[in-house]
Image (tube, helix red, strand yellow):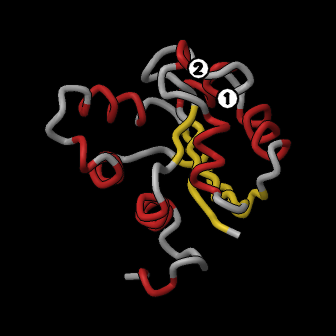
Amino acid sequence: MNITLMLIKPDATNRHLIGAILKMVEDDGFQIEFLKEFYMTDELAAEFYFEHRDKDFYMPLVEFMKSDKIVAAIVSKPDAVHELRKLLGATNPDKAEPGTIRATYGETLRRNSVHGSDSDESARREINLIFPNNKYFPQDKK
């Protein structure tokens, strides 16, 4: 079993879509291992989006991610990263396959309702940022 991270973004939590999105995840065969509701801080956003810090969309993205609560989920399934990204759909909801989370609930490129780690390495890094005392990567604990 593999794990990955999914974030339900502020645009979706604000529209009361947490349950609907989690149901789609479970209906696709994922096990929800852990859930956490939180507000992103400046410090966490800076670490989470570090690789984008020099891009023009960085500050608007950070401000958006701090705008309302977020729900983080560690989910598991064989080939979790790939399978979750397939369920999430294309980043741009207008280009996402019908039946995906972003096609169903996304509004715009930024307000696309969900984030999913793009690799096993990213999942490990992001899980450790959001769930610092997790049982999956104990050697990474500070």
Q: Is residue 52 above or below residue 130?
A: above
Q: Residue at x 62, y 54 (%)?
A: 36
Judging by the rendered image, the residue that carries numbered circle 1 is 101
Q: Position of residue 83 (x, y in %)?
A: 65, 48
Foreground pick, 7 / 13: 7
SS of the residue under disc 1? helix
At x 51% / y 79%, what residue is drawn?
137
Left or right position of 68 against 72? left
Q: Amino acid at mark 2?
A: Gly
Who's the residue at 75% across and 43% down the image?
25
Horizontal placement of 44 versus 55: left or right? right
Quadrant in which the C terminus appears: bottom left
> Which numbered disc flags the more N-terminal residue, 2 or 1?
1
Q: Position of residue 102 (x, y in %)?
A: 61, 25
Whether residue 68 is situated above or below residue 119 in the rendered picture: above
Q: Is residue 142 shown left or right of residue 36?
A: left
> Relative to residue 107, is residue 41 depicted above or below?
below
Q: Quadrant of the N terminus?
A: bottom right
Residue 4 placed where, x, y %?
58, 58
Query: Which residue in the protein does label 2 denote?
Result: 106
Q: Residues within 10 Å of mark 2 (few under 14, many from 20)?
A: many
Q: Please tell me which residue is depicted at 72% across the width and 63% down the height of the picture.
A: 33
Q: Amino acid at mark 1?
A: Ile
Q: Position of residue 39 (x, y in %)?
A: 49, 44
Q: Nearer the viewer, residue 51 or 41?
A: 51
